[in-house]
Amino acid sequence: MADEPRINPYSPPVTSFHSDEESPQGNQPLIPADLAIDLQHVISAVNYAITERQSHDNEEVHISASEICQMVLALACRMTPYDTSGNEAIEYLREMNIRTSEDVGLAIEELNRLGLTRADDGAHPSDFDGLFDLGTPAGQWKLSFDFATELS
């Protein structure tokens, strides 16, 4: 038992490969290494948003691109609660390779492809375009989010 590798069942695989017969992608990673952490944070945010919404409604819910991005940012704040400036939350997201709302959209697209989330018929990756960019001040984002308010 002591010689067996320790595996975290909650972390996504860094890479998974399919043979040429199984996938038209050939030997392309199922989850690229640079998205692996993004997917874990994004799926947690989506699940949290759905849980919050379903507590008020028993039907299946739709979570919009802006709501997903809000929850991705809010979850980063919850992961770094001791910094009231939001700087640690921003750094946490950067470490996760989440720098823009488009990154979140790519993660959602991959989660949909893997069958871990399901997009509505009218949903499109462009729904995530330009909502936030950690390289610009939050006041310039299309998404209304205030780190100070979230962290208070």
Image (tube, rainbow, N blue to C red):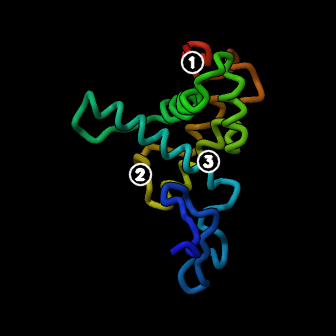
Q: CA distance from mark 2 to mark 1?
A: 30 Å
Q: Amino acid at mark 2?
A: Arg
Element type where label 3 sits in the image: helix
Q: CA distance from mark 3 to mark 2?
A: 17 Å
> Residue 109's x, y, as percent?
55, 52
Mark 2 or 1: in front is 1
Mark number for residue 107?
A: none
Q: Earlier in the sequence, mark 2 or mark 1?
A: 2
Looking at the image, the residue that sits furthest to the bottom is 21
Mark number for residue 118?
A: 2
Looking at the image, the residue that sits furthest to the right is 135
Q: CA distance from mark 1 to mark 3?
A: 22 Å
> Residue 60's x, y, as percent?
28, 41
Against 15, is 96 above or below? above
Judge left or right: residue 141 versus residue 119.
Answer: right
Mark 3 lies on residue: 38
Judge left or right: residue 5 versus residue 116.
Answer: right
Give me the residue at 49% from left, 39% from top: 45
Mark number for residue 151?
A: 1
